[in-house]
């Protein structure tokens, strides 16, 4: 592989106010770009000033959606050090997504080096406040100009970064969710386990309708019987029932979240029973009737842990923790964010130090 070329910006942008970052609204000064052709493989890796890219209107991604992406964060630790969180898991998952979408895979070491180099070059974009972070968004698009329906022969890998605020600006707050029993997110044999734009495009209508009814997220059911719980919004989902933590098993239509994997490993490390299996909505509403549904939460890189306070399914509405944060949800949030921020020990060796 040829060395990475770096062209620094001559016009650094001014940084946004750290109190008003939100999510994905500001972008750092540089981006990583590499090109792929079927003859030469991945090549021409470069870090250049962040800015518009040019594509032919016939670029295949614009017509048939051949795209994959990832989402991870760089954190500034207590002593100014820079940490990533299990980056190898994101790279491995990106390659799995590529495989499903017919996109050429990347060399994991080359990719990790690209991420580290970009974060180092834009390290002054990593927020100072420990609760904030620099969100990293790698993605691959099919750039070949062609309207034939087949795998493209040309692609571009880009990595952009965005300083983001704590997901909960005023502390962790439980959300209310709407059990979606009409639209589905993914089906058996489909692309649900891949991180790709096409899953998002097809989920937006349901999300908007749930918002209109006053719910912040959609609880997705399986695409065949619409009985089994799969995910919540763009997060994996967990329930605590009668002392046991349960999460839907990976079945090919659920996205294998890095946070999901970390939550399961952390619970095992603590000796809290955790089971991956099929979970029906009926079962949860029945557990609630019996007073056994103790906690519910979503997991993902953006929010880490998102407690679920209320759920609506058809005509039935239930309250879960009466507006409080469940004990296990709170402990997981504190531990995982504590590890990411370098505040506490890292018993499972998840931090990856840059530089
Ligand atoms: C990214 C994503 C998740 C969460 O994965 P993490 O690796 O924990 O961020 C869950 N569901 C969907 C659909 C996703 O795209």
Image (spheres, rainbow, N blue to C red):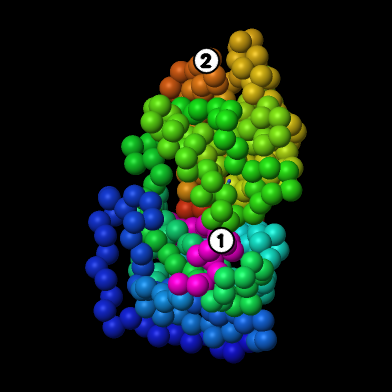
Q: Horizontal and vertical percent for residue 164?
A: 38, 54
Residue 235 appears in the figure: yes
Residue wearing tag 1: 65
Which is more N-terminal, label 2 or label 1? 1
Query: Image height check: is 103 above or below 207?
Result: below
Q: Quadrant of the N terminus?
A: bottom right
Q: Residues within 10 Å of mark 1 (few under 14, many from 20)?
A: some
Mark 1–mark 2 distance (CA, rounded to whole Å): 37 Å
Q: Is residue 163 magenta?
A: no
**Nearer to the camera, 147 or 24:** 147
Q: Horizontal and vertical percent for residue 261?
A: 66, 46
**Nearer to the camera, 294 or 340:** 294
Magenta span covers which residues?
57-81
Q: Horizontal and vertical percent for residue 293?
A: 61, 19
Where is residue 335, by image quadrant?
top right
Query: Image height check: is 97 above or below 32?
Result: above
Q: Horizontal and vertical percent for residue 310?
A: 49, 23
Residue at the front extreme, as displayed: 148
Q: Residue at x 34, y 50 (%)?
A: 22
Residue 262 appears in the figure: no
Tell me the SS state at disc 1. Answer: loop
Query: Image height check: is 114 above or below 171?
Result: below
Where is residue 79, by image quadrant?
bottom left
Residue wearing tag 2: 315
Tell me the SS state at disc 2. Answer: loop
Q: Residue at x 73, y 38 (%)?
A: 249
Q: Is residue 58 magenta?
A: yes
Residue 261 is left or right of residue 206, and the answer is right
């Amino acid at each position: 592989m040829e060395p990475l070329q770096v062209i620094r910006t001559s016009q650094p942008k001014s940084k946004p106010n750290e109190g008003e970052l939100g999510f994905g609204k500001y972008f750092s000064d540089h981006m990583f770009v590499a090109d792929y052709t079927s003859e030469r493989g991945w090549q021409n890796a470069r870090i250049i000033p962040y800015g518009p890219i040019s594509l032919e209107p016939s670029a295949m991604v614009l017509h048939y959606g051949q795209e994959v992406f990832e989402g991870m964060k760089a954190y500034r630790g207590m002593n100014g050090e820079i940490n990533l969180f299990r980056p190898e898991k994101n790279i491995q998952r990106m390659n799995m997504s590529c495989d499903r979408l017919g996109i050429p895979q990347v060399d994991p070491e080359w990719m990790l080096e690209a991420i580290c180099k970009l974060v180092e070059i834009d390290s002054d974009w990593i927020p100072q406040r420990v609760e904030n972070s620099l969100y990293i968004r790698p993605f691959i698009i099919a750039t070949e100009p062609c309207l034939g329906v087949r795998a493209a022969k040309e692609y571009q890998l880009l990595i952009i970064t965005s300083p983001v605020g704590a997901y909960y600006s005023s502390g962790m707050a439980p959300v209310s969710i709407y059990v979606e029993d009409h639209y589905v997110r993914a089906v058996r044999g489909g692309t649900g386990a891949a991180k790709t734009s096409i899953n998002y495009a097809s989920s937006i209508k349901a999300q908007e309708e749930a918002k209109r009814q006053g719910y912040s997220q959609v609880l997705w059911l399986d695409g065949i019987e619409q009985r089994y719980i799969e995910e919540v919004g763009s997060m994996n989902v967990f329930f605590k029932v009668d002392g046991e933590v349960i999460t839907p098993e990976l079945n090919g239509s659920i996205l294998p979240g890095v946070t999901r994997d970390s939550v399961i490993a952390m619970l095992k490390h603590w000796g809290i029973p955790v089971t991956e299996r099929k979970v029906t909505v009926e079962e949860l509403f029945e557990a609630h009737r019996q007073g056994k549904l103790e906690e519910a939460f979503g997991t993902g890189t953006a929010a880490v842990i998102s407690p679920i306070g209320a759920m609506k399914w058809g005509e039935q509405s239930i309250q879960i923790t009466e507006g409080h944060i469940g004990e296990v949800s709170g402990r997981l949030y504190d531990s995982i964010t504590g590890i990411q921020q370098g505040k506490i020990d890292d018993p499972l060796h998840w931090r990856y130090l840059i530089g």
